[in-house]
Amino acid sequence: MNNVFNEDFFKDRIIYSFLPNSIKACVNSTPKIILNVCGNHIISYKNDINSEDYITLLKALYTIILIHEIILLIRRENPKDVFTNEYKPKTDNYDYDDGRSFIYHIFGNFVIIYIDLPFAEKILTKKSWEKDSKELKNQLERIENKNEDEIINAMIKQGGIKCYDSTNESEDQEIEMLDFCCRLNP
């Protein structure tokens, strides 16, 4: 874990690539974290993709993605080491992977789908990460205490992003044609 704070740790372990539309990131056998550069899994509300607010939202999203993947990367880099389940909460009906469990430990939910600007700013504030801080959980609760229509309406007015969640995919979900190809393609 001490290596995570070395400035070259991520530089040596992240590959930027084109992945299928529903995959934000993964850890391969090399081991490296592969980040999807297409942005197909993101729906943006109100924010121009070149604005500072949108960049803040993306930084927060990729912070969450890296937190999710870091546990998997550490396990792949140290396959012989005994790895504690200290941050893997017990669940009765679900068997979540270690990344989702680590997200739950930090944010109080296994998946983060919506991020508005105040939540993104808290994610990127060092004080929010201090021991016993409830800031991140409080921000997520603030958003999730609304129904989906209320969340979307707030995002349309104030800005934010919604991320695709593969665990919640339903057959009646409409997928835009744009989501089948990389948005970076002309």
Image (spheres, rainbow, N blue to C red):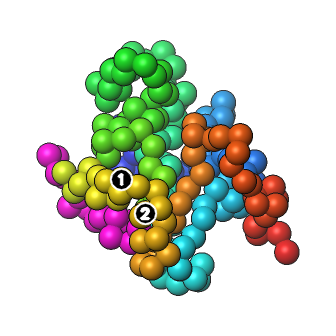
Give the magenta part as a residue range.
116-133
Tell which of 94 and 99 is nearer to you. Answer: 94
> Label 1: which residue?
144
Q: Is residue 127 magenta?
A: yes
Q: Is residue 103 magenta?
A: no
**Contact? badges 1 and 2 (CB < 8 Å):** yes
Residue 14 higher or lower than 122, as above or below: above
> Looking at the image, can residue 17 be seen?
no
Query: Is 25 positioned to the left or the right of 157 in the image?
Result: right
Question: Which residue is under mark 2?
Answer: 151
The residue at the point 60 percent across, 65 percent down is 43
Looking at the figure, which quarter contains the N terminus?
top left
Residue 135 relative to residue 93: left or right: left
Quick check: 142 above or below 111?
below
The residue furthest left is 132
From the top left corner, tell me how far across and down residue 108 is, in percent.
Answer: 30, 42
Residue depicted at x 51% and y 32%: 72
**Which corner quadrant of the image does residue 31 belong to?**
top right
Q: Residues within 10 Å of mark 2 (few under 14, many from 20)?
A: some
* Image quarter of the C terminus: bottom right
First of labels 1, 2 by sequence position: 1
